[in-house]
Image (spheres, rainbow, N blue to C red):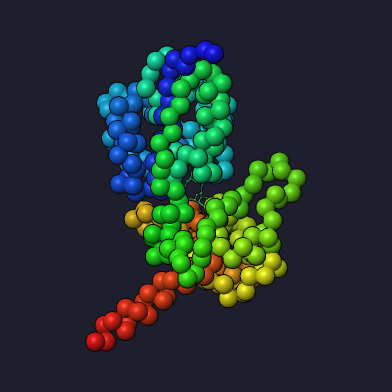
Amino acid sequence: MSKAIGAVSLVGAGPGDPELITVRGLKRLQAADVVVYDELAGKELLAFCRPGVELVYVGKRCGKHAMEQERINGVLVERALAGLRVVRLKGGDPFIFGRGGEEMAELVRSGVQVEVIPGVTAAASAGAAAGVPLTHRELSSGVIFLTGHERPDKPESTIDWQALARTRMTLCIYMGVKKIAQISDQLIAGGLEVDTPVAIVSRASWADQSSLFVSLGELAAGTTGEVPAPALAIIGEVARFPAMVSALAETASVS
Ligand code: SAH
């Protein structure tokens, strides 16, 4: 077996607030010769790079990739094989809807060593931002991460939304805002009540983060309007938690 010569760190940048990267991720960033980053990977983090670092932007704008995936892989492989310390900085966690697996496979195929440094994924950050625990002993015994946007070349959705409705678990939907009305419709058809609470969390951990609390029925009816991107939907009984907590706070202050 050939020995890997170069190395790339796939680093999770977290959801946007630069303070949410891990200590190890920050260390790799500070030591890097090359940083390949995309749109959601907290640009403020780049200020921690050393002078003279090569910064390569490969994000997407208006749905168009600044650089195709093959080109991104090419840049990573070339720089790593040249002996440079390469960081591939990715929003959230590299292995959750981040194509980290695809990049890793390509790097390994090219004889490059890969290290993965996990990050705070958007669902965790959205839960924190909205005050919604993703699991709760009385409300939900599990959480499922899903994408609302599958590859456009897939003939039909591989996600059985109706079956998911029957799990009664918390559903965290990434990249789903555009399709949220159809998704909600399917979940209702699968047996979720129209008054199932939903939190739509926009720009979690950013200075302008916001949360919208609605019902699944309202989403299915398309009455909730636009929300700022990026946004994530948390569907399930746990989304009732902030209301429960404020009721508790009211009784506490009456003493
Ligand atoms: N690897 C990333 C996810 C990339 S997919 C992670 O682990 O978080 C991009 C989707 O993530 C967006 O469409 C949105 O649904 C979600 N997302 C990313 N950052 C977010 C943020 N700060 N607030 C809310 N949703 C976010």
Q: Is residue 64 above or below residue 34?
A: below
* Residue under the point 39% across and 15% down: 83
State the residue in front, 39 or 168.
168
Is 192 left or right of 33, judged from the image as shown? right
Is 81 left or right of 159, judged from the image as shown? left
Q: Quadrant of the C terminus?
A: bottom left
State the residue in front, 221 or 122.
122
In the rendering, at what x and y percent does residue 76 appear?
47, 24
* Residue under the point 41% across and 43% down: 119
Name which quarter of the figure residue 249 lies in.
bottom left
Q: Is residue 212 visible?
A: no
Name which quarter of the figure residue 243 lies in.
bottom left
In the rendering, at what x and y percent does residue 197 appear?
53, 71
* Residue under the point 62% across and 49% down: 149
Q: In the current view of this chain or complex, which residue is farthest to the bottom?
A: 255
Q: How many marks?
A: 0
In the rendering, at what x and y percent does residue 44 appear?
32, 41
Q: In the current view of this chain or complex, which residue is farthest to the left?
A: 255
Q: Quadrant of the N terminus?
A: top right
* Residue under the point 65% across and 65% down: 166
Name which quarter of the figure residue 251 lies in.
bottom left
Q: Is residue 149 visible?
A: yes
Q: Is residue 51 above or below residue 135?
A: above
Q: In the current view of this chain or complex, which residue is farthest to the right?
A: 155
